[in-house]
Structure formats: structure tokens, C-alpha cells
Image (cartoon, grey):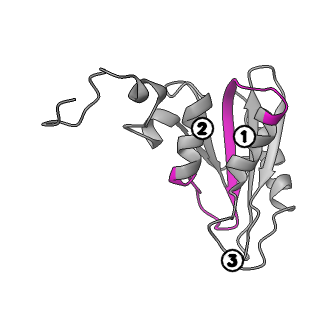
Amino acid sequence: MDYQVLIARAIEAKQSAYVPYSHFRVGAALLTKSGKIYTGCNVENVSFSATNCAERTAVYKAVSEGERDFVAIVVNGDNNDYLPPCGICRQVLAEFCDMETFQVVLANNEKDYQVATLDKLLPGAFLTENLKSGDSHSPPGKER
């Protein structure tokens, strides 16, 4: 997969970040199976817990427009290093993505990036299977 367009869109999205407290901008670009790209930036709030990450902004924009099948996401931040999604963003991605094939691209720029699948970034994800009664996903030593 050619990531250059996605990386450029994530870097561009970062410019819209609302970060009056941390001054740390993050941009994301999410590719759907239909070929559309949804971008997002982080949006801070004075209460901090109400802050929304760039990755979730992109996912929520896509979902609000009817998209549910995602192929890859690029994350780019102001840290001049590879910036992985936070745990909450990883869990949100797990809701909509194939853990083994969905690609997470951590990009400094169009030529400097790393790629990982979501299952490598979120081992032991809480998935819909965990909500089914009688499943065998209980922790060791815990009977249902």
C-alpha cells in the first residue's frame, strides 16, 4: 500500500488541532474499504477528560457518514517520533477493524514511518465476543 497520500492528509489535518493546553498537535487520516479518507485532529478541553484524540475524531466522522469498514490509519504528531494511538483509540479502532489486517501507520513524514497491525498494538482487546454469555474468555481461575 502506498501511504504517502494518507500521511500527507494526516499532517495536513494536524494543522487544525485545537490544543491551547498541551500545544501538542496530532493529525490522523483513516482509509476506508470504499477508498474514502477521513481526517481528524485532536480537540482539547479544559477538563482534559473531555479531550478527543485525532484518531477517534477520524473514526467518528467516518461512522457518522455510514462507513464501518476500515483499512488503515496514519497518525502524525508534533513529537518528531513515531506516535502510537492511545489505549482508548486502539479500543475504538478494534470496534470497527479486522485486528489482524488493519494497518496503523506511525508517521514522521512521507518517507519516515512504521507500520503495525492493530492486533500487535492491542493484544487481548475487549471485543464483542467477550459480551456473549458462556464464552470461554474468563481469566484463568475464574469460572462463570
**Circle 1 sits in a helix, a strand or a loop, which is it?**
helix
- The reply to whether callout 1 and callout 3 are in contact (CB within 8 Å) is no
User: Could you tell me which residue is drawn at 68 percent across and 64 percent down?
Assistant: 50
Q: Residue 20, position in %: x, y?
A: 78, 78
What is the distance, in whole Å, between disc 1 and disc 2 at their CAs? 8 Å
Q: From what the image shows, is residue 79 above or below residue 34?
A: below
Q: Quadrant of the N terminus?
A: top right
The amino acid sitting under disc 1 is Val
Q: In the image, which disc is placed on residue 59?
A: 1
> Mark 3 belongs to which amino acid?
Ser
Q: Please state the horizontal and vertical placement of residue 51, each as a whole percent of the image.
A: 69, 64
**Is residue 5 something one can see in this rendering?**
no
Q: Are marks 3 and 2 in contact (CB under 8 Å)?
A: no
Amino acid at the residue labelled 2: Leu
Q: What segment carries the magenta color?
A: 64-87
Q: Which residue is mark 3?
A: 22
Mark 2 nearby-residue class (10 Å; few <14, some 14–19, many ≥20): many
Q: What SS does tag 2 mark?
A: helix
Which residue corresponds to the image point at 50% horizontal and 52% vertical from the top-left?
A: 87
Counting residues from the start of the chain, the first of labels 1 and 3 encountered is 3
Q: Which residue is mark 2?
A: 93
Q: Is residue 124 left or right of residue 85?
A: left
Location of residue 46 (image quadrant)? bottom right
Q: Residue at x 17, y 36 (%)?
A: 142
Disc 3/disc 2 C-alpha distance (Å) = 24 Å
User: Relative to the observer, which residue lies in front, 50 or 110?
Assistant: 50
Q: Are marks 1 and 2 in contact (CB under 8 Å)?
A: yes
Q: Could one spot residue 144 in this view of the protein?
A: yes
Residue 41's spot in the image, x, y percent? 78, 56
